[in-house]
Amino acid sequence: MNTLSNKEKNENIENSLTIFQKKIANVNSEINQLVFGQEPVIEQILVSLLCGGHALIIGLPGLAKTRIVNFLGIILGLETKRIQFTPDLMPGDIIGTEILDEQNKANNYFKFIRGPVFCQLLLADEINRASPRTQSALLQAMQEKKVTVAGKDYFLPKPFHVLATQNPIDQEGTYPLPEAQLDRFLMNIKINYPDLEAERKILLLSSKEDSIKPKNVLSSDEVLEFQRLIREIPVGESVVKYILNFINETRPETSNIKSVKDNILWGPSPRASIALLAASKAKALLENRYSPSKLDVKSLIRPVLSHRINLNISARADNVNLEEILDDVNQRIEE
């Protein structure tokens, strides 16, 4: 049995990284020709997808959340389906349901009709407009990449990603997502208004709306290969130590920082550490670097951790800003 030497393995990885960088450059070029002023949002979504994770995109209506997801599905070659979450949506509308097979009535035989969750990229549009019961229908799919109906498992296609859009929770007709489901999202991405120059481009492009058709750049197999490649990227011990220290200092039970002890009810789980490390690897590769640095970790702290930490009642009553606490932790670790 032939085995590759370390030199040959490194050469294969370097060749794969070169291909990756060219392809990702094409992806960025294609999406940024169609969506203006949201480059940080697009980068964070790509980081989530290349890590094999899911992303929650939060922003007011009309800021191109749905547009970005639809275009990325085409560009990345992923089978995309959309679910419009509404108050009357039921779990069976997402995962599917069993019906009586008309040709096998005598045997009382049921067959499973697959729901829209059976795809490679699921757009869960305005996810917080559905009830918590319906929102939780995605829990097993997001974590285990399968659904269970009547005791039988049905596996989802590979890759499988959920990109959910959410309106701010202070809007009428919305429900906050359960903590367990929030933790399944690798990143919590906030989308803001574009600047004036970007909005000018949007206005000019609006008259050409019918001709806007993104090109396919990647295939789903290539996405899977890039996800495998990112898992193999080496990480320095200083980066691992920084992640562990930061996570430890955001947990009130182990933290030495007053703002954490006074305001946080519970901190992030080990899943947050894994997400932060994976996202840092992906960000480094997107920027043509072969290993992540502490700067990559710092730039991802807010989107990776902000939805995994819960403020206590007193902090909520005082309108304490969680992101400022994260900045405080970062500053204290650096001292």
Image (cartoon, helix red, strand yellow):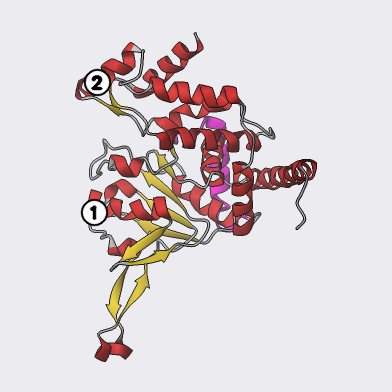
Q: Earlier in the sequence, mark 2 or mark 1?
A: 1
| Residue ID for mark 1 | 87
- Residue positioned 68% across, 43% down in the render: 25
* Circle 2 residue: 315
User: Could you classify mark 1 by the number of other residues whose Cα lies within 10 Å: few (under 14), some (14-19), or many (20 or more)?
Assistant: some
Q: Quadrant of the N terminus?
A: bottom right
150 above or below 55? below
Work out which residue is located at the far front of the displayed protein and give it: 1
- Alpha-carbon span between mark 2 and mark 1: 30 Å
Residue at image point 39% right, 23% down: 323
Residue 77 image point, x, y percent:
59, 58
Task: Decide whether residue 194 is among the magenta residues.
Answer: yes
Q: Of residues 17 and 46, which is closer to you in this image?
A: 17
Q: Label 2: how many residues lie within 10 Å, few (<14), some (14-19) or many (20+)?
A: some
Could you tell me how many numbered marks the image carries? 2
In front here: 225 or 115? 225
- From the viewer's side, name the closer residue of 31 and 213: 31
